Image: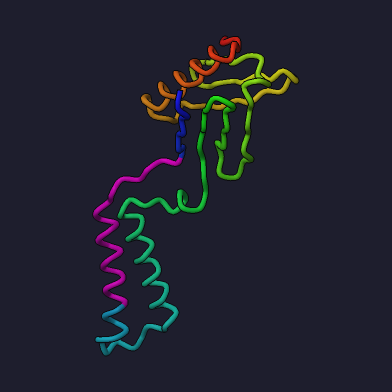
Amino acid sequence: MKPLHINLIKKTPVNYLRLILGVVMMAATIYINFFSAITRFQPYQLIALFLFGVYYTIMGAGLNLASLIFKRYITIDSESIVMKTGIFQAKAESKWNDMSEIQINITAIRIKLKDGSDHQFEYQHLHKDTIHKLKTAIIHQAKEQGIIIG
């Protein structure tokens, strides 16, 4: 089975209102700074307006700034399961050889290791198709490795 990689950061749809608002903010900044006789704005105010316009344009285009900086994912391959479920949480890697049991519940997957520790991943916030792919990949790999599925 080929490795499964699931990105857990939600994709943002294109928001045309935000996109237009950002372009208008940037255009207004350029107009006021170079072509207008209005002098009541300080340079730091114009810079702030322009940066807000850039931010709104990026968010309106559907680019999530958190996905550029932070990573949240699950990777399942023939050797291990690697989970980084939170932006500020450490990466948890569980080798198939170290697992004793996998419990698949309605809202979570619990991986019990031979040393007595366990990892839990709650997946109720994921899309149904992603949950199905995740469960299928885990069950398939667990059966290949001879791990008890509960």
Extreme-right residue of the structure: 115
Residue 99, given in percent of the width and then of the height, sits at 65, 19
Q: Nearer the viewer, residue 2 or 71?
A: 2
- What colouring style does the render use? rainbow
Q: Please state the horizontal and vertical placement of residue 111, each as a whole percent of the image.
A: 61, 21
* Quarter of the figure with the N terminus: top left
Residue 101 located left or right of residue 7? right
Mark count: 0
Question: Would you say residue 54 sits in the magenta stretch?
Answer: no
Which residue is found at the position 56% from the left and 11% from the top? 149
**Predominant secondary structure, magenta span:** helix
The correct choice, above or below, for 67 with respect to 136 in the image is below
Location of residue 114 in the rendering, given as x and y in whole percent from the top left corner: 72, 18
Q: Pick whichever, 46 or 148, lies toward us.
A: 148
Q: Nearer the viewer, residue 88 or 112?
A: 112
- Membership of 16 in magenta stretch: yes
Quarter residue 30 falls in: bottom left
Quarter of the image with the C terminus in it: top right
Q: Is residue 148 above or below residue 135?
A: above
Residue at point 46%, 37% (across, down): 8
Residue 82: x and y in percent read: 57, 32
Q: Residue at x 31, y 71 (%)?
A: 26
What residue lies at 24% left-to-right and 61% top-to-bottom?
20
Query: In the drawing, does residue 131 fall left or right of residue 93?
Result: left
Query: Measured along the vertical axis of the image, is residue 33 above or below residue 3?
Result: below
Q: Nearer the viewer, residue 9 or 80?
A: 80
Q: Which residues are magenta?
A: 9-29
